[in-house]
Image: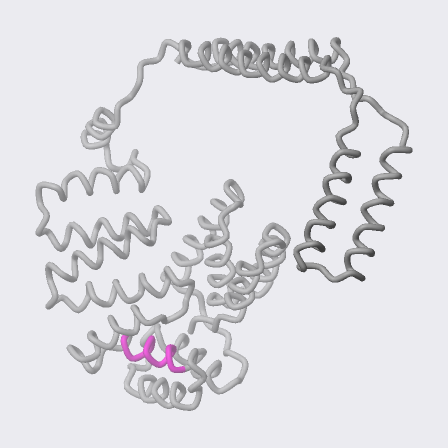
Amino acid sequence: MIVFWVAAGALTAAAAALILMRAAKAASADSAVDPSAGLYRRQLAEIDELADRGLMGEAERKSAHAEAARRLLAATDAPRDDWSADPKARKRVLLAVVAVPALTLGLYWGLGAPGFPDQPYAKRLQAWRTAELATLSPPEIGAVLRDVLKTRPDDAEGYRMLAMVEAESQNMGGAVRALRRAVALAPERNDLRRMLGEALVFQSGGKVEADAQAVFAELLRRDPQDAAARFYLAQAKAEAGRGAEAASDLRALLGEMPADDERRPYVEAAIAKAEGRPAPTREPSPELDAIRGMVASLAAKLEQTPDDPEGWVRLVRSYSVLGDVTQRDAALTKAKARFADRPDVLTQLDEAARAAPMP
């Protein structure tokens, strides 16, 4: 590492010295001749050539000729303002270029760990495999599971566990891939298919897009009474503007649910949304708390790495789905300010802010 910093500092200083030497040479060169006069003379000749070839009318030639002549006279009469460089300024710049890498190297030597050996990924992975599970972070657990699954590629349950860890690590893409693999290994397991559909919905910020609809449609074909499939397919209809049809499907689902089913408040809220009524107040649940925790983790991640337009769109849509209007508007304001020069991102943010609240 020390060798790297020394080499980087030397190369930086050499590049700066080369630039300054070239600039000094240009400054010391004879600059008594103003090139602008020659430029306008060539322009006059080109205008005459175009007119002679019949590519420019006489009136246009006279107008262009007069404009070029006016600029030529202005350039000829303008006082010369020769450019010059201060040699002391060049020395200060070169000193700063040399000092910054040297200061960086000194700080690293004093505060870093220049003698600490590299930690290859294989060694870290081995340490994670032998460590207590409670001491590992979700990404570390995910790395261990992926390594284990290399020797057990047909373990559907292992991929289900990996998907849960990936979701906890805010890697919904990895969770979806793991669940797709699990479903392929155990297509008879409706619970895996249900998890895949819900992961796709969460990945899209609460929207039931085509991929999720296909998963839930297959789940409903296998089990016509599956509540999750019926609910999300009804949500897809509501998102497509078929509110009356969605409300009818949801009312049928609600009528078949037990009175003590904890999912009833979500279905009631979805019915109200589809019918354009205010959603009734619902009691908090552990499932909802878990979702809020994942959204909070995404918000914290964006505070550290804010230049992530897809992340901001997901965050705004997640707050919309959760019905948290205050947080949604705050995130929307921040995102629009950061990506004010990206019309495509602004359009996605506005669309995300209009996502239907989750039941």
Q: Is 227 in front, or is 103? A: 103
- Spot occupied by residue 358 in the image (x, y as percentages of width and height): 43, 71
* Image quadrant containing the C terminus: bottom left
- Spot occupied by residue 242 in the image (x, y as percentages of width and height): 42, 86
Looking at the picture, the colour scheme in use is one colour
Q: Residues in magenta? A: 229-237
Residue 224 lies in quadrant = bottom left
- In this rendering, would 196 be left or right of 100? left
- Spot occupied by residue 49 in the image (x, y as percentages of width and height): 69, 49
Please report the residue visible at 82 percent of the width from the left and 56 percent of the height from the top: 63
Q: Is 273 in front, or is 349? A: 349
- In this rendering, would 348 be left or right of 4? right
Please report the residue visible at 31 percent of the width from the left and 40 percent of the height from the top: 139
Q: Is 143 in front, or is 71? A: 71
- Spot occupied by residue 300 in the image (x, y as percentages of width and height): 49, 46
**Vertical placement of residue 182 versus 37, above or below:** below
* Image quadrant containing the N terminus: top left
Q: How many marks are shown on the rendered structure?
A: 0
Residue 235 lies in quadrant = bottom left
Please report the residue visible at 32 percent of the width from the left and 89 percent of the height from the top: 252
**Vertical placement of residue 257 versus 38, above or below:** below
**Vertical placement of residue 359 versus 35, above or below:** below
